[in-house]
Amino acid sequence: PVFVAVTPEPQTAEGAADAVERAVRADVEAFGLREPLLRRPSPGWALSDVTPALHAVLDGAAVGGRWDVSSLVALDGLVDEKLRAGLLSLLHGPSWPPEKGADPAYWCDGSFSDTLSGGPASSGVGLRPARLAALCAEGRDTPPAVAELEARVGAYLRAVDAASGGGGVDVCRMPEAAFGPEVTPLAANAPVSSDGEAYGWHIDADPALLPPSPWTDCFGRYPNRSPGKPRFVTALVYLSPEWRWPEWGAQTRCLDPPTGEVLAVPPAPGRLLLMDQDISHAVTAPAAAAGDTPRYSLVLKLCLHSHRGSVAPPLAMPGWSPPSASGSAPRLKG
């Protein structure tokens, strides 16, 4: 990115650097590029309720002289039954039984899209535009269940950062200025068995591949997890009140491109999957045994801004068991 400033007097190198820093800060504020989720979780829920169901790394590669891997962690207990039910209630009418299928007043065929350029992820049933807009509302208009989800995810990630010796982290929604209005910070999905092979491999985002925007003006293009740069992370919540695993299938598949190895994340009611947005992944349609029952999920897209420029904000508690290394990731040292 190039910033140009016109000043009445010649500038020293230090003065020019200060002018650029002020210009970046002004753009960050003007375009809402770093607006932390500051709500506190409601009483009755505690971080001690959260346990890891799966923790893995994959897609290893040498990047800038370091060995880089993508991470994912599946968490149980962050979304309890009350919050799961509250989030699912945003996806259907009050008298509609969710196990009957996607409520046609809320959903329509072919409208699901959570990537910039469409493609394989832009198929299947998605929320109608007005319903999606209501789900993504901000400030006082944020649905209470979404606000509580954001509060808990934020509290968890800040606790992980603190336990890892970080200097603090701002957990933010993906701003519209990064991609434009066609990529929303929240999305929902309701695949059913009849979808078959409708869902292909895709990534949610990669900061190295962003279009020109105020985001790239301020932060540039860079590999995800680059120290000192915002980390792009997806939080996916499984919302179906019942899911019989493995009979009903519908796992989230994560691909290690160098080896072709696939890691499957089993869905469970209320389970939350945190993963880097540049992980190649795919929805799996439910098995025939699920009948017409959809596997509901809600996706929240986040940017993590570390207060300390030398590290990328972590996703898992340091005291948990080390992650399993899939595909090309075992080259990870330490």
Image: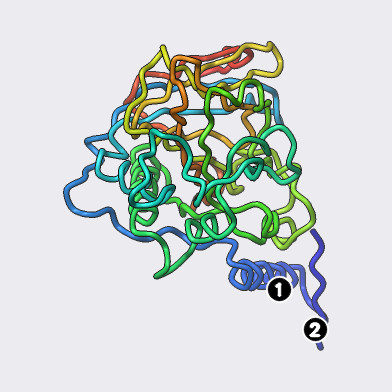
Provide the secondary structure element on which disc 1 rests. helix
Of residue 54 and residue 201, the one placed in the foreground of this image is 201
Q: Is residue 314 visible?
A: no
Of residue 124 and residue 19, the one placed in the foreground of this image is 124
Measured as percent of width and height from the top left, residue 44 is found at: 17, 48
Quadrant placement of the N terminus: bottom right
Q: Is residue 57 visible?
A: yes
Measured as percent of width and height from the top left, residue 103 is found at: 47, 44
In the rendered image, the vertical position of residue 42 relative to residue 279, given as above or below: below
Distance from label 1 to label 2 (Cα)? Answer: 9 Å
Query: Which amino acid type is marked by label 2?
Result: Thr
Residue occupied by mark 2: 7
Q: Are marks 1 and 2 in contact (CB under 8 Å)?
A: yes
Q: In the visual, does 233 lie left or right of 147?
A: right
In the rendered image, the vertical position of residue 90 relative to residue 81, given as above or below: below
Q: In the visual, does 269 lie left or right of 258?
A: left
**Residue drawn at the location 44% of the way across and 14% of the way down:** 289
> Looking at the rendered structure, which numbered label has been put on residue 126?
none
Query: Which amino acid type is marked by label 1?
Result: Ala
Instruction: Rate crowding at label 2 as few (under 14), some (14 to 19) or many (20 or more) other CA atoms within 10 Å.
Output: few
Instruction: Rate crowding at label 1 as few (under 14), some (14 to 19) or many (20 or more) other CA atoms within 10 Å.
Output: some
Looking at marks 1 and 2 on the same chain, the residue that comes earlier in the sequence is marked by: 2
Residue occupied by mark 1: 19
